[in-house]
Amino acid sequence: APLCVRCSVLMPPLPLLFVGTVCRALTPHPPCPTAEPVDLLKALQFQAQPAGVRKTMGFCPTRRAAPGPDVAYRISRQAQISAPTRQLFPGKFPEDFSIMALVKAKAGSQVFLLSMYDQHGTQQLGVELGRSPVFLYQDQSGRPAPEDYPLFRGVNLADGKWHRLALSVHKQSVTLILDCKKKVTRPLPRGPRPVIDTRGITVFGTRILDEEVFQGDIQQLLIAPNPQAAYDYCEHHSPDCHAQPHAPQAQEAQQRPARPEVRDMEQTEQVRPLGLISGRIRGWMGPAG
């Protein structure tokens, strides 16, 4: 069920205060936040094609009103991509949020697409691809415990095919929406005021000191500061190939006019190679132990 309602669609033009009052009275959920998703591929400078990253054809070979195919990025083992989390989220990381990806992982792989660490080197967030993937989440009080991480049994996110993956984190649960159809909800027993520390780093395609790394194609990787965005992912950000265009995609088709829907992040720091970051993480982890 939707977690919020866009009241502006339902209400005629009225003073903002009045609309808000009526909206709260008529709907069981608050209006959707207006903040745009963070485009992690753009923020991590995939468009510059660093080592191990090259452009390739994406999810759709053709789209209506598009001059060419979708653009994705092919990732090889040589890719080492990471950045300070504050570069991606200058403010507070949202308590409830959505993670959305359009991705084709190497068949048979079992890897983390995204990992976020706190300033001491503890992993706080992780999106795994593969068979029966886990959603790793740990708040500032260490909750949930590893044995309580949400596990999505019977799901395979690494079969060599494109998948539209959306995760909605809302209060004490996380919902996986796969290919715009399959919905699976698992408990997420975190604390009442969970916090994700943004003073650490974010790593793409692996975990610190893991041997396995993501190999495959990726076209989108978005994080939105509201849990409803995951439910709207296929409509707003990753429509079917022959659907009427709703809005520009995060990764535009070749030579498509640039008018990105997602936030254009200011690059306050350079993205650094994983080797440099992992050494820094090990330095953090020493005093913390």
Image (cartoon, rainbow, N blue to C red):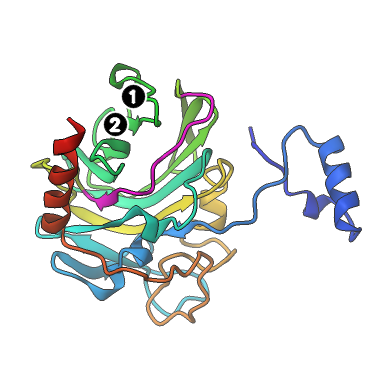
Quarter residue 48 falls in? bottom left
Q: Which residue is mark 1?
A: 151
In-front residue for pair 155/210: 210
Q: Residue furthest front?
A: 287
Secondary structure under badge 1? loop
Q: Which residues are magenta?
A: 191-205
Q: Position of residue 82 (x, y in %)?
A: 24, 57
Q: What type is the residue that disc 2 sits on?
A: Pro
**From the image, which quarter does the N terminus lie in?**
top right
123 vs 138, left or right, is: left
Question: Which label's residue is closer to the chain start, 2 or 1?
Answer: 2
> Quick one: which residue is furthest to the top in this view?
147
Work out whether residue 205 can be spotted: yes
Q: Work out whether residue 43 or residue 49 is closer to the camera in this orientation and state it.
A: 43
Gap between marks 2 and 1 measured at Cα: 6 Å
Q: What residue did someone put label 2 on?
A: 133
The x, y position of residue 210, in whole percent, is 12, 40
Q: Are marks 2 and 1 in contact (CB under 8 Å)?
A: yes
Q: Is residue 73 left or right of residue 172?
A: left
Side of 252 where 110 appears, left or right: left
* Quarter of the image with the C terminus in it: top left
Image label count: 2
Residue 121 belongs to the span the image colors magenta: no
Secondary structure of residue under mark 2: loop
Residue visible at 32% across and 23% down? 153
Rendered location of residue 10, percent (x, y): 83, 50
Name the residue located 64 percent from the left edge and 37 percent from the top edge. 2
Q: Is residue 273 above or below residue 283?
A: below
Residue shown at the point (18%, 46%) measured from the top left: 281
Majority secondary structure in the magenta region: loop
